[in-house]
Amino acid sequence: MKNRKDIVYGVYSEEHDIIEAVREARSRGMEIYDVYSPMPIHGLDPVLGLKESRLHIAGFIYGLLGTLTAFLGMTWIFTKDWPIIFGGKPYWAVPSFIPITFELTVLFAAIGMTVSFYVVSGMGFGVDNDVLDERISDDKFCLAFDNAEVEADEAKQFLRANNAEEILEKTLKA
Amino acid sequence: MNRFEFSGKLKTVLLVGIVIGLLSLIVEYFVVGDELHSQFWGDIILNNSYFMGMALMALFALSAFIAAWAGWYSVFKRLFEAFNAFLIPGAVIIFIVALGNYFGWHHLYLWNDAEHVAHDEVLQGKSAFLNKNTFMIMTLLFVGVWLLYRYKLRSLSLLEDAGVKGDYSAHQKMRNWAGTFLPIAGYSSALLIWLWLMSIEPHWYSTMYAWYTASSWFVGVLSVMIIVLVYLRGKGYFELVTKEHLHDMGKFLFAFSIFWSYLFFDQYMLIWFGNVGEETVHFKVQQGEFPVIFYTILILNFIVPFLGLMINTAKKSNVVLVVIAVLTFIGHWLDMWLNVKPFVGEATAEFTGIHEHISHYPSLPEIGVMIGFLSLFLFVTFKCLSNAPLVGENDPYLEESIHHHS
C-alpha cells in the first residue's frame, strides 16, 4: 500500500461556491477525496452524500452507562454498603440521587463522545497529521481530489471550470 | 397560496368546540357545581390562564427572535403573530374574574374574603399584595401592556408588508419594541402568575412557581403551533416551510420540555429536602391525593419528549412531531389542572366545610371547557392568520429563512 497521497485541491472563499462545486463533481461521478472547512457548513453533508454520524448513538449509550453507574452505585452505597440517614430521609432517597445521576450522565456522554471522536478521526496527543493547507483553519475552504482516484489534469480542469480561486498540489503522508 | 382561507369545515368544527365549551360551563354552573360555583370559576381561571399564557409566550418568542436578529422563522412568522390573538378575548375574561373579586361573584381566592382574613395572620401579612385592588390594577396594567405590544408588533409587521422592499425602517422599530418587551414580559408574567394562580393557595409560595408555569405555557404554545403548522402544510399553505424549519420547532419542543422538567424537579426536590410543613403541603395534595395525574404529567412532559424527540429523524417526522406535540399539550394542561383545581377545591372546602367536590380526575365538563377554550384560541388565531398574507415579502430575513439549513 502506498503511504503517500498526491492531492490536487482548489481553494474557495465562499461556502456556496464550494457547495456548488461539490454538487457538480458528484453529478459527474468524480470521486471527492475530502472537503476542508474551518467551520461546519450547513447543508454540505447531504450534498457530499455522507451518512449520518453514529457518534450520537454512542453518546446515548455512554450517557445511559453514566445514569446506571450513578443510580445503581448510590443505591448500593446508601442501602447496602454504608446506610446513613440524611435529614430524616429514607435510605433509598431517589429525588436526592437525581442531580448526581444527571451529572454523571453528562460527564460519561461528554468524555465518551470526545474520546470516540478522537479515536475515529485519528487525532490525539502525539499524532502528527499532515495539514493540507494552513488556511483551512482560518478563512478558506478546500475541495481535494486524490490523484489515484481522479486524474490530476481532469481535477485541475474541473476546479478551474468551477470557480476555484487557486489550484494547488500537495503530497500528504497518508 | 399566500393567503389563508378560514372557512368551511374548520370553522364549523371550531364553532362546535366553542359551543361544547359554553354548554360545559353552563352545566358546571347550574348542574354539577357546589353552591359557590367554584367548579365554574376554577375552570375559567385555569383555562384562561393557560391559553392566555400560551398567547403571551408566542408574543414573547416572536420578540426574542426579532431582538436576536433570528432569520430562520421568517417564512412562518405570521404564525407567531397570529398565535397571540387570544390575548384579546383572554383580557376580557380575566377582567370579569377581577371584577368578580369586587362583587363577590366567586370564591376562588381565600385572601379576598374579609371574614377569613380577619382571623388568619398569614393572610393579613400578605394583604399588601394579595388584595382585590392589586389584582385589578396589575391585571389591567400588564395585560394592557401586552396588548399594546401585540398591537405594535403586528401593525409594524403589516406596515413592513405595505412598504418598499429594502426599506428596513419598520423592522428597525420592531426591534426596539421587541427588545423592550422581553424584560417587561418576564417580570409581568411572573407577577400575574402569582396573582392569578399561585394565590389560589394563598398560604403556600414557591419562588420557582412563576418560571415553572411560564415554561409550561411555552411548551403548550410550541405544541399547538407544531400541530397547526403540520396541518396547514398538509392543506397546501406555507410551501416554503421545509423539514428544516420543523426540525427547529422540534428542537424547541425538546429543549423546553427539558427546561420544564428541570424547573419542576428543582421546585420538587428543594421542598422535599427542606421538609418544611408550609411548603410540603402543596405536594402532599398533588402527589398524595392525585398520584395518577402526578406521575402521568411526568411521563407526558418529560419522558415522552425526552426519549421521543432525541433522535434527529424524529424531529423531522411530521407524525412523530404531531403525536408528541399532542401528548405534551395534554400533559401541560393536566399540569395546570393539578396546580389549580385541587387548591380551588381546598379553598371551597374552607368556605363550605364540605370536601366532597374534589374529583381525582378531570371530569367531562372540565374537559369540555378545555375544548371550548382551545377552540376559541384556534378560532381567533385562524381569524388573525387569514387577515394578512402568510409570507411577509419585505421581511429582511426572508431569503435567509427560505434557505434555512440546520
Image (spheres, coloured by chain):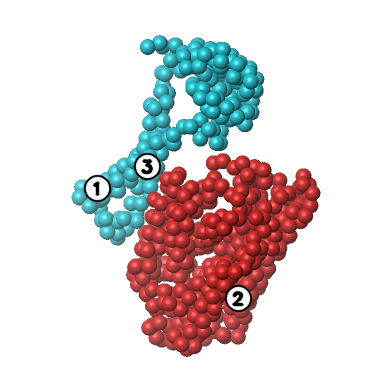
Chain colours: A cyan, B red
* Left or right for B274, reference B8: left
Kind of residue sitting beneath label 3: Phe
Please tell me whether mark 3 sits on a helix, a strand or a loop.
helix
At 35% from the left edge and 47% from the top edge, which residue is drawn?
A: A101
Chain letter of disc 2? B
Q: Is residue A4 above or below residue B67?
A: above
Kind of residue sitting beneath label 2: Ile
Give the Cα separation between the discs numbered 1 and 2: 55 Å
Q: In this view, does B69 lie above or below A13?
A: below
Of the 4 image quadrants, the one containing the C terminus of chain B is: top right
Q: Contact, CB < 8 Å: mark 1 with mark 3?
A: no
Which numbered disc, 1 or 3, marks the residue closer to the eye? 3
At 45% from the left edge and 85% from the top edge, which residue is drawn?
A: B33
Please tell me whether mark 2 sits on a helix, a strand or a loop.
helix
Q: Where is residue B25 in the image (x, y as percent from the top left)?
A: 51, 81
Q: Contact, CB < 8 Å: mark 3 with mark 2?
A: no
Where, by quadrant of the figure, is residue B341 drawn? bottom left
Question: Is circle 1 on the same chain as circle 2?
Answer: no
Q: In this view, does B234 lie above or below A20?
A: below
At 38% from the left edge and 59% from the top edge, which residue is drawn?
A: B299
* Left or right for B89, reference B166: left
- Disc 1 crowd, CA 10 A, few/some/many (<14, 14-19, 20+): some
Circle 1 sits on which residue?
Answer: A77
Which label sits on residue A60? 3
Give the Cα separation between the discs numbered 1 and 3: 25 Å
Which label sits on residue B297? none
Which label sits on residue B93? 2
Question: Is circle 3 on the same chain as circle 2?
Answer: no
Chain letter of disc 1? A
Where, by quadrant of the figure, is residue B305 drawn? bottom left
